[in-house]
Image (cartoon, grey):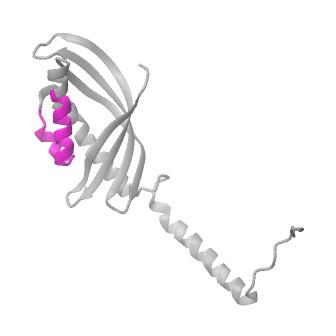
Amino acid sequence: MSRSLHRRAPAGGTAGAALRSLLAISCVAGLAACGESGPDGASEEDRLAIEAVLTDYLPKLGAAYAEGDFEGLASGAVPKEVETVRRRVYELETGESRTLRPSLQSFEIERVDVWRYSNAAVTTLEVWDIQSLASGTEQILSSATDRYRVRYQFKRRDEGWKVIDRRIEYQFES
């Protein structure tokens, strides 16, 4: 059985050609209308809103670890995530007898993926100065500047974007 190396002319004649042209123009116009989205599919408005949440949230996350101030996290995270942070801090203090004193130095958003309007996955690169202290003392056990790739899950609520989960994906060599 031989295969033809030539393409058959599409059916439909002139009417088919006009329909294909109309579809091609519609596709190009649709792509142009998507020009407001970033390379990862998120609108500039969503990227800026998520960046604003992280700009506010990350220093408060450091304060939660250092000082036990969990109330400040509520402006940027859902209650379940605030409770997760509270549990991590408690485990460090009771299980490992240490307190972390993290200080955010910088963060950069690598990627934002938004789907179904109300969900977002965000990847950041974060630099933190972290001191580890013996619990209940000012004795510094270690001090380092650490770089992380962090993955966030966000949910859009009436009051804006909220962190619903934060996971460190990778810690870079110092």
Magenta part of the chain: 69-90
**Image position, residue 13 (x, y; %):** 76, 88
Quarter where residue 115 is shown? bottom left
Is 49 situated above or below 105?
below
Quarter where residue 72 is shown? top left
Q: How many marks?
A: 0
Identify which residue is drawn at 23% across, 11% down. 141
Q: Is residue 22 left or right of residue 77?
A: right
**Image position, residue 161 (x, y; %):** 26, 53
Is 174 situated above or below 31?
above
Q: Quadrant of the N terminus?
A: bottom right
Is 57 situated above or below 171?
below
Q: Quadrant of the C terminus?
A: top left
**Image position, residue 170 (x, y; %):** 41, 31
Identify which residue is drawn at 82% across, 72% down. 7
Camera-nearest residue between 26 and 123: 123
Name the main secondary structure of what is drawn in magenta.
helix
Q: Is residue 68 left or right of residue 162?
A: left
Quick check: is 70 in the magenta stretch?
Answer: yes
Quick check: is 85 in the magenta stretch?
Answer: yes
Camera-nearest residue between 139 and 6: 6
Identify which residue is drawn at 12% across, 27% down. 67
Extreme residue toward the right, this view: 2
Q: Is residue 76 left or right of residue 113?
A: left
**Image position, residue 35 (x, y; %):** 49, 62
Camera-nearest residue between 117 and 31: 117
Quarter where residue 29 is shown? bottom right
Identify which residue is drawn at 68% across, 85% down. 18
Q: Is residue 27 left or right of residue 110?
A: right
